[in-house]
Every structure is written in structure tokens, then in C-alpha cells.
Amino acid sequence: MLAAIEPDVKGYFRGRKPDQVGPDASVAADLLFENVQVPSDNIIGELDYRFFHLMTYSQQERLECAISNLASAAQILDETVV
């Protein structure tokens, strides 16, 4: 199930934010869930299709990251060669 979890929900914990290399907009952190009860209004997409939704939307995000990285590399190359 994909769901929007409110930060103050009982059983939801945000772990450490690791040091990482990459764009500042790319946020990573450990998200921990322990017996979280999600209201039906917070369910995103169809129930029991979580893997399908994850694979569908992850591919789009990966493509967007690849395009952004290629554009950055091209700009850096242009600035270096000049």
C-alpha cells in the first residue's frame, strides 16, 4: 500500500539522515514504521498494487535524474574546455 503518512502518526519514526554525495534536492533518510494505522483517505493509488505503483513511478524518477545529470555533465565539460 502506498500512503501519505503524517509525521506525528503513532508508530512512524524518522531515522538518521546519512551523509551523501549528490544533488541537495535528493533527500535520503531511514523511515521506520511499526504498526502504523493509515486512514483510508491517505491511501494513494489502488490497494494491493504497491509494487506496480513503485515500479511505474520509480522509473520516471530515474529517467529525470539521468537527464539532469547528463545536462550537468555537459555544462561542466563546456566550462572546462573553454
Image (tube, rainbow, N blue to C red):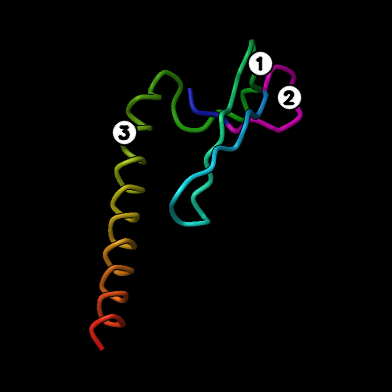
Labels 1 and 3: the sequence-earlier one: 1
For mark 3, give the secondary structure: helix
What type is the residue that disc 2 sits on?
A: Val
| Quarter of the picture holding the C terminus | bottom left
Q: Amino acid at mark 3?
A: Met
Q: Residue at x 28, y 80 (%)?
A: 80
The kind of secondary structure element at disc 1 is loop
Kindly check if marks 3 and 2 are in contact, taking CB atoms under 8 A apart as contact.
no
The residues bearing labels 1 and 3 have C-alpha atoms spaced at a distance of 24 Å
Q: Residue furthest bottom?
A: 82
Name which residue type carries label 1.
Gln
Name the residue rendered at 69%, 17% in the picture. Answer: 11
* Residue ID for mark 2: 9
The prevailing secondary structure element of the residues shown in magenta is loop
Residue at mark 1: 37
81 vs 21: above or below: below
Q: Position of residue 13 (x, y in %)?
A: 67, 24
- Mark 3: few, some, or many residues within 10 Å (few <14, many ≥20)? few
Query: Is 79 included in the stretch rendered in magenta?
Result: no
Indicate the secondary structure of the residue bearing disc 2.
loop
> Quadrant location of residue 18?
top right
x and y, in percent, of residue 36 in the image: 65, 16
Q: Say left or right for 5 vs 46.
A: right
Decide: few, some or many residues near mark 2? Use Cα within 10 Å; few <14, some 14-19, many ≥20.
few
Residue nearer the viewer, 39 or 81: 81
The spot of residue 66 in percent (x, y) is: 28, 55
Q: Nearer the viewer, mark 1 or mark 2?
A: 2
Q: Which residues are magenta?
A: 4-12
Q: Which residue is mark 3?
A: 55
Counting from the top left corner in percent of width and height, residue 26 is at 49, 50
Say whether residue 26 is left or right of residue 65: right
Marks 1 and 2, how far apart in space? 8 Å
